[in-house]
């Protein structure tokens, strides 16, 4: 199956409706995904990216129905990660001498993954490849999403092929941003940014400014996952600039796990206190033991403050809380306030442990935290509400 995107540009990728986990078990994909590959048939023919390995056979068979593979003049590997390069080994069996255009680190990654000495052509920002009347212009985009990543831009049709950037894990039969449910689309976009691109936000801003400085007209952004932005493509660029700038909404998120309901009761009383302190704040609670990790990270991304709670177990914290703390350490959130809470029976280390780990992860700890022994009574419930009120009042800059 192919879909004409514009003039001589066709989508020749794979929609993966069944995908529910990506990056191994690292990223939940409730709405599937797609691996977008594009065929540009001008005087010269270029193939931009491929698909994930499990779909290699299907991809190459479909591509061979679309075009005699020997007519492909150039392969562009914007990013070597397996979900874009996985079909290369099979494809290259058919056309072993076709040059593969990629960055220097792209060569390193592709050789590391596939151990093949293909005909690599290294490109850097500003290099051009003529397809006849139109040309591809390459722009290195390190860390969007790997050090090897790059974009390419097709003159004439004014299309930016952005690979991972501006994408989302969202399977859709319609492929275009104006043809899908907008709430679903932007929920997947912000989840993708929060979970994958947050650590690279300074580079996102720098790279977008660099591309805008080229003053290239932009009619479409063809990503490598999810929809093609043809209706006002600048809207997702503007969103990225907002998200990359220490984004936050007027939200506090409470994250906890519980053994015998005491820490859960604390969480609910703290939430009541926050509402009492500032009823304009959105407050959301999640039990980490039964909530999708990536959805939780998206909520943290949207928050100006978080509260994290665990009871004390074996002088430590519950594993669901420890796991999330490990995860968010690598995401390098900035400008977010935090505090911890938890119940205990004997030793009571959990609050200190959580606060220290949140501080190590870049959160601004604005309270020593609240720990209560055994189960909460009227008096300690009131302390939890007071804790919530005080936290809410510290949200203003
Ligand atoms: Fe879609 Fe970084 O791979």
Image: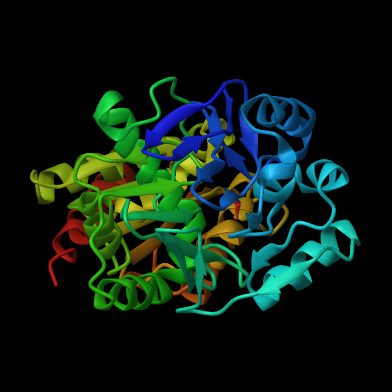
Can residue 346 be seen here? Answer: no
Q: Is residue 66 left or right of residue 280?
A: right
Q: Nearer the viewer, residue 364 or 52?
A: 52
User: Can you say whether 270 is above or below 128 in the image?
Assistant: above
Residue name at image x 18 percent, y 66 percent = 394
Residue name at image x 59 percent, y 63 percent = 349
Q: Is residue 148 left or right of residue 154?
A: right
Looking at the rendered image, the quarter that the C terminus falls into is bottom left
User: Can you say whether 22 is above or below 370 in the image?
Assistant: above
Quadrant of the image occupied by residue 174: top left
User: Can you say whether 95 is above or below 228 in the image?
Assistant: below
Residue 203 pos. (x, y %): 42, 75
Can residue 369 be seen here? Answer: yes
Residue 141 pos. (x, y %): 49, 71
Residue 223 pos. (x, y %): 45, 47
Residue name at image x 25 percent, y 50 percent = 219
Looking at the rendered image, the quarter that the N terminus falls into is top right
Residue 102 pos. (x, y %): 64, 67
Quadrant of the image occupied by residue 109: bottom right
Q: Is residue 323 left or right of residue 170?
A: right
């Amino acid at each position: 199956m192919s879909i004409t995107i514009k003039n001589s540009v066709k989508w020749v990728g794979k929609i993966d409706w069944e995908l529910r986990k990506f990056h191994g078990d690292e990223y939940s994909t409730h709405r599937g995904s797609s691996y977008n590959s594009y065929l540009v048939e001008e005087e010269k023919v270029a193939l931009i990216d491929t698909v994930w390995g499990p779909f290699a056979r299907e991809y190459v068979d479909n591509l061979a129905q679309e075009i005699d593979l020997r007519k492909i003049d150039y392969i562009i590997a914007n990013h070597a990660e397996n979900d874009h390069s996985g079909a290369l080994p099979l494809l290259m069996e058919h056309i072993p001498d076709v040059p593969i255009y990629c960055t220097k680190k792209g060569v390193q990654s592709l050789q590391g993954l596939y151990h093949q000495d293909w005909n690599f052509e290294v490109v850097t920002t500003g290099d051009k490849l003529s397809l006849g009347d139109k040309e591809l212009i390459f722009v290195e985009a390190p860390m969007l999403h790997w050090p090897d990543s790059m974009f390419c831009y097709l003159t004439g049709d004014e299309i930016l092929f952005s690979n991972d950037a501006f994408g989302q894990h969202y399977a859709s039969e319609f492929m275009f941003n104006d043809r899908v449910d907008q709430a679903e689309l932007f929920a997947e976009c912000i989840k993708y940014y929060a979970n994958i691109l947050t650590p690279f936000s300074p580079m996102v801003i720098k790279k977008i400014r660099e591309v805008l400085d080229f003053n290239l007209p932009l009619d479409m952004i063809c990503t490598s996952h999810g929809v093609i932005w043809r209706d006002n493509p600048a809207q997702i660029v503007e969103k990225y600039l907002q998200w990359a700038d220490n984004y936050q909404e007027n939200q506090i998120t409470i994250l906890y796990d519980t053994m015998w309901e005491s820490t859960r009761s604390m969480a609910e009383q703290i939430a009541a206190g926050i509402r009492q302190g500032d009823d304009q704040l959105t407050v959301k609670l999640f039990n980490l033991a039964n909530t999708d990790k990536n959805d939780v990270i998206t909520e943290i991304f949207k928050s100006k403050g978080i509260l994290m709670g665990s009871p004390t177990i074996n002088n430590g914290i519950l594993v669901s809380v420890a796991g999330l703390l490990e995860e968010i350490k690598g995401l390098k959130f900035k400008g977010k306030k935090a505090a911890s809470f938890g119940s205990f029976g004997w030793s009571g280390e959990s609050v200190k442990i959580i606060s220290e780990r949140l501080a190590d992860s870049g959160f601004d700890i604005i309270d020593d935290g609240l720990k209560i022994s055994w189960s909460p009574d009227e008096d300690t419930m009131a302390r939890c509400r007071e804790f919530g009120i005080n936290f809410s009042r510290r949200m203003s800059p």
